[in-house]
Image: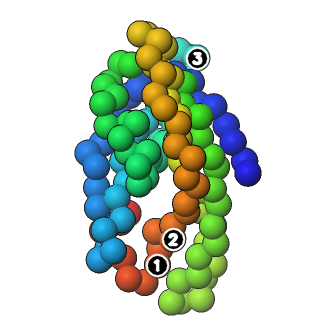
Amino acid sequence: MNEVNISGKVKFVDEVREFGSNGFRKHQVVVETGDGRWDNPIPVEFTKENIELSKNLQVGDEVEIQSRINGREWQGKDGVTKWFTSINGFKILKKNNDIEQEPSSSFDTYDEYAEDLEDDVF
């Protein structure tokens, strides 16, 4: 597995969103990892039970998020193949108050471009 730590300040916390008829849920958090001169916002997704780890984050929190990088290939109805990368968080350490969130042991991927999902996924 490809794992990476994302460290920085929380820039944006989205609401928990549900997609498709199977009830797939996702929570996105954007972490600013830039050096002050150059922005480098990194979107991190939390899914399934890992949503519980991220839903209390607030803009301005200093965090370190342990994540897995996932890639997938998708071919549209037009025959064009595209590749997508996502960063899926599974553990959070809040640096500004040293509260460590419990990690999840699950590692599930999904195909957000499957035919049965709603068009508004993007």
The extreme top residue here reads 97
Element assignment for label 3: loop
Upstream in sequence: badge 1 or badge 3? 3
Tell me the tag on residue 93.
none
Q: Is residue 117 above or below residue 100?
A: below
Q: Is residue 3 above or below residue 121?
A: above
The answer to which of 72 and 77 lies nearer the viewer is 72
The kind of residue tagged 1 is Ala
Q: Residues within 10 Å of mark 3 (few under 14, many from 20)?
A: few
x then y, percent, for residue 101: 46, 28
Q: What residue sits 46% from the left and 68% below the top?
A: 112
Residue at image coords 63%, 78% = 81
Tell me the residue that label 1 is attached to. 114
Crowding near the residue tagged with mark 1, few <14, some 14–19, many ≥20 C-alpha atoms within 10 Å: few
The quarter of the picture where the C terminus appears is: bottom left
Which kind of residue does numbered mark 3 sit on?
Asp
Give how far across and how far down residue 34 sits, in percent. 56, 23
Q: Measure the C-alpha gap from mark 1 to mark 2.
A: 5 Å
Residue located beneath label 2 in the image: 111
Secondary structure found at label 2: loop
Q: Residues within 10 Å of mark 2 (few under 14, many from 20)?
A: few
Q: Dot 1 lies on which element?
A: loop
User: Coloured how?
Assistant: rainbow
Residue at which label 3 appears: 35
Answer yes or no: do the residues labelled 3 and 2 have beta carbons within 8 Å?
A: no
Give the side of residue 59 with respect to residue 99, left or right: left
Q: Is residue 106 above or below residue 31?
A: below
Q: Earlier in the sequence, mark 3 or mark 2?
A: 3
